[in-house]
Amino acid sequence: MIDLRVNGIEKWFGGLHVLKDVGFRVAGPELIGLIGPNGAGKTTLTNVLDGAIKPTSGTVYLNGARIDHLPPYRVARAGLGRTFQVTRAFRRMTVLENLFVPALAISPGSTQRDFRGKASEILEFLTIDHLRNEYGRALSGGQQKLLELGRLLMLNPDIVILDEPFAGVHPRLMEIIYRYIARLNEDGKAIILISHQMESIFTLCHRLLVLNYGDLIADGDPETVKNDPAVIEAYLGEDEDMSGTGTPERTERRDA
Amino acid sequence: MRQRIPLIAGCIAVVLLAIFPLVYGRADYDYVMHMWITAFFYAILASSWALLAGYAGQFSFGHMAFMAVGAYTAGLFNNYLYFTSEATNTCLEIAVGSWWLVVLDPIGVSAEPFTCLDAARQAWNSEVVVTKPSLWFGILFGIIVGGVFGWLVGRLVLRLRSAYLALFTLGFSEILRAVISAEIQVTRGQAGLELDPLFPAGISLFGTAFSAADKLPTYYVMMALFLVCLATMTALERSRFGLFVRSIREDEDAAAALGVDTVHYKVLVFVVTSMIAAAAGAVQAHYIGIITPNIFIILQMALVVAMAVVGGLESIAAAAVGAVVIYFVLEFLRNSFTIGSVTIDMTTWRLVFFGALVMVTLRFQRNGLLHPLIEWCTRAGVADETVAKRVAGAATDGATEAEQ
């Protein structure tokens, strides 16, 4: 049973208070949307959860084990995987090699041959099987995003954080990502989806977390959150409507 | 078939190199043998630097310092350690079974140093046996110490990338050179530390006795070391080690997020490449017979970097071949030539030619001159396969849509 407990996370960057007493729990294969305006602290929270940065205070437990002091590779092996807002495919490695990295990292003593079948199945699912021997740099931006998602399937974590998977993606690829998320969820994974694509968030997620300047100002089902005056005020402004398809800004400070 | 060309060419090259010293019979035999021994030495250094910089993305300028660690460890081992059958009571010594392992006092820079062992000899009778440990243990010790230094530097540069890493390792190299230069009483500084030849008593090979000065045994030793290093690095490159260090080169954060222990592999690649460089340095030191801090001046490091760059930074074999080619070209360019009434002194201009070659390579062929050739062979058919699969996929999609 998946159980992520985030308790009282605080993060300061010098004089900047980026996360303020953030706490929530993920129990079971939930599909959660994490939203908030640029600079709200979404990516910082992701970095804290995956071990890339240490919180100033607070704790994170995954399936009963404390993970907030662990390096990222141990967090990944413990069962928390993530993608990055700016795609980070290994550009001078082939598509297959990209997939073998997480597979071998979590399976000591195994070889690439052991994972060829699984890699093929994943690449076919993501419709990029024909590119298996091409270098990452030869792929389009959207295809690189799919490759990044494929690597997560090879890592096979319990909890997946997808950071802006729909940003700059063609509608056809968006369909594939929708199928990907559905597959993960059917496989019993918990998903935290960070996106500015409100339509996607409301279509896919059963629960929303809203961050605003480091504060977790809402945690609940989409209907409740959508009508929360504080969320409307903080996130979109009084004149906006949260059911829209707007993508207010595509770029965000990478480590914010 | 095209994919097998590099392997076939490599096998042919190894066979030719193995028989070359036996069939070459010109008057310049010793000179040519010396060139090949030195070319192997540089090939080991360039290929191991390619593993460190090209594969793992760790642009270290301390590689020649690790080579020097191996050379000086072997040199100090060869000069300072003795086994005696009696205690000297004048040197630092420990009992090893019925023998004494003796460490000499600093030998200083005088031509004929009078050591604590010499003092003891005056008091001993002629039956006391004094012998040196095998220099091969010194070489082995040099490799281990090289690995320890690699581990230390690897740990220290964990958080450094690109220019910062390069500057740090350059600093390490210069500090080491300054220490060796300053510790004259121990290392003999610029006066040079002398070492025994690899086979001090000569050796018999193929039914022929070779003296300590003959180059053929050393040729085979250096060639064997080169092949062992190349095979080791190739095996590593094709293992999970190679996959992980390349992922670290591409994106360290992404690799860590996918479960790769980046700290472990970054340190490990430093340890492995340092040990290889130290092995080359230790053997070469015994071959040359004398070492000074000049063996790892920045110009030497630049030479190794240029060899790897011209060959191909992302291929161990290409960097090795690049080193051999560059070394021979530089040697051949020592000959001055005349055009009309103008004589060009190539002892100076060859370095200009060499610099220009590096600049042209970096500008027009960043992956080196040989690596693209290897890629052309090993990746034969990839483009065709991609297109064929895409066409097949499109056909399947079309058929499915038609059915619907």
Image (cartoon, rainbow, N blue to C red):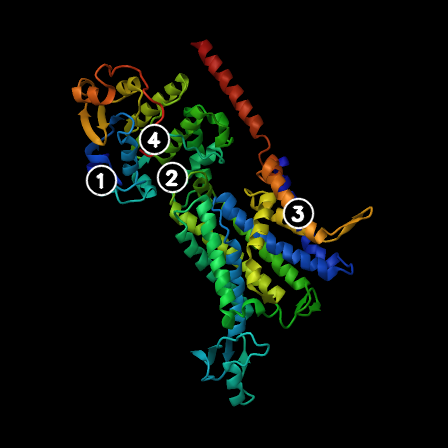
Q: Is residue A241 left or right of residue A83?
A: left
Q: Mark 3 lies on which chain?
A: B
Q: Mark 4 lies on which chain?
A: A
Q: Is mark 1 on a helix, strand or loop?
A: strand
Q: Residues within 10 Å of mark 4 (few under 14, many from 20)?
A: few
Tell me where residue A21 sits by quadrant. Answer: top left
Q: Which chain carries label 1?
A: A
- Residue at the right extreme? B340
Q: Is mark 2 on a helix, strand or loop?
A: helix
Label pair 3/2, CB-CB below 8 angstroms? no
Question: On the image, numbered disc 2 is attached to which residue?
Answer: B253
In the depicted view, which residue is nearer to us: B404 or B383?
B383
Residue B97 lies, in percent from the top left, at 44, 78
Between marks 2 and 4, how big is the CA–CA gap?
16 Å
Dots 4 and 1 on the same chain: yes
Residue B83 lies, in percent from the top left, at 50, 78
Q: Residue at x 44, y 38 (%)?
A: A114
Question: On the image, numbered disc 3 is attached to which residue?
Answer: B352
Task: Mark 2 vs mark 4: give the one in front.
Answer: 4
Question: On the image, numbered disc 4 is attached to which residue?
Answer: A253
Image quadrant where one finds the C terminus of chain B: top left
Dots 3 and 4 on the same chain: no
* B70 lies above or below A20: below
